[in-house]
Image (tube, grey):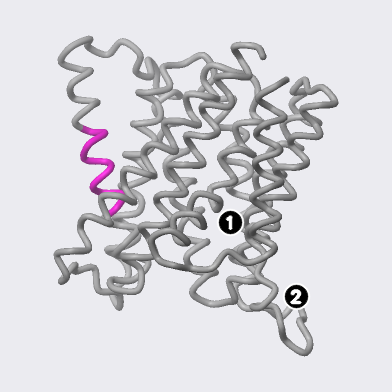
Amino acid sequence: MSNSITIAIIAGLGGMLGWGFADFFAKKTIDKIGDVASLLWAHTLAASVLSAYIIFVLIKDGTAGFPDNFSGWLGVAFFGFLQAIVYIFVYKAFAKGKLAVLNPIFSSYAGLVALLSIFVFGEAVTGNIVLALLLLFCGILLMNLDLDGLKVKKLKLDRQPGLVEIGIATVLATVWTVYWAHFIAGKNWKIYASLMYIFMTLTVIIYAKSQKNESLKVKDKTVWKYLAGIGIGEAVAYISISYGFGLTSHVSIVALLSGAFALPAVILAAVFLKEKIHLLQTIAIILILCGVALVAVI
């Protein structure tokens, strides 16, 4: 296994675990304070830590590793803004429609990233990598598929509430991931990821403040530890994938491994919340683990 693939695997697994833990902790907060408040405070906590890191770097090393021109700063700000828009559209979709319909659609963005990276941007892949990516993608789709939620007499996809919003979010997430990978390549991934996250949080704050009918207060103090968990998980995920995109050309591996974040979330929910793992999720776990193992032995 080459050093480049090793980096891609570590980065992808970091994204998977980070977003998986964030999703798990979100189960503890969204029902109590709502989607928008959870999004706002979790990102604000993480951005505060990353801001402290940025200040530390500035004091220690000056501006070395930071964007050195206006286009660089504009790019970091744009990617932060765009990722915040993805979150907003996802939350709007989930608030309107059925998770059973919308989740599999959004989860497909990881596969679309792999396809774009391979067929449009010319990422080199071997037959074994293609098979591993296919296993991962199938596992991701099955992990997010809820047949019980789809048990309706006539499911008319074109009439499902939230479909437009989730479609926009899926396209934007695909575009963000592919172009962030190319934007950050060869740059200081730690600084760029931190700055991007800060700009993303600023956008989320502006959006949250504009929602006049949403309560942003956290009345239950026990929720703060879960919000911190979400923020830490999110920050770890973005820094991990940026590490992979910055140091390796295996965009598809990083994207699909990190896109399997439902796996740790499901396992954590089963262990700590006593939620049952159904048959499709069991098959999905097996497929994802086989995909990871196949990538690891290439």
Q: Residue furthest right?
A: 127
For label 1, the SS is: helix
Q: Is residue 79 above or below residue 246?
A: below
x, y (%) of residue 150? 70, 78
Residue ID at (33%, 47%): 201
Residue holding disc 2: 157
- Residue 149 visible, this angle: yes
Mark drawn on residue 100: none
* Residue 163 shown left or right of residue 258 in the figure: right
Q: Nearer the viewer, mark 2 or mark 1?
A: 2
x, y (%) of residue 46? 28, 43
The alpha-carbon separation of the residues under discs 2 and 1 comes to 17 Å
The amino acid beneath tag 1 is: Ala
Predominant SS of the magenta segment: helix
x, y (%) of residue 90? 52, 61
The image quarter in which residue 28 lies: bottom left
Span highlighted in magenta in the image: 42-51
Residue holding disc 1: 169
Instruction: Report if residue 44 lies within the magenta region.
Output: yes
Residue ID at (29%, 53%): 42
Q: Is residue 230 above or below residue 254?
A: below
Residue ID at (49%, 38%): 15
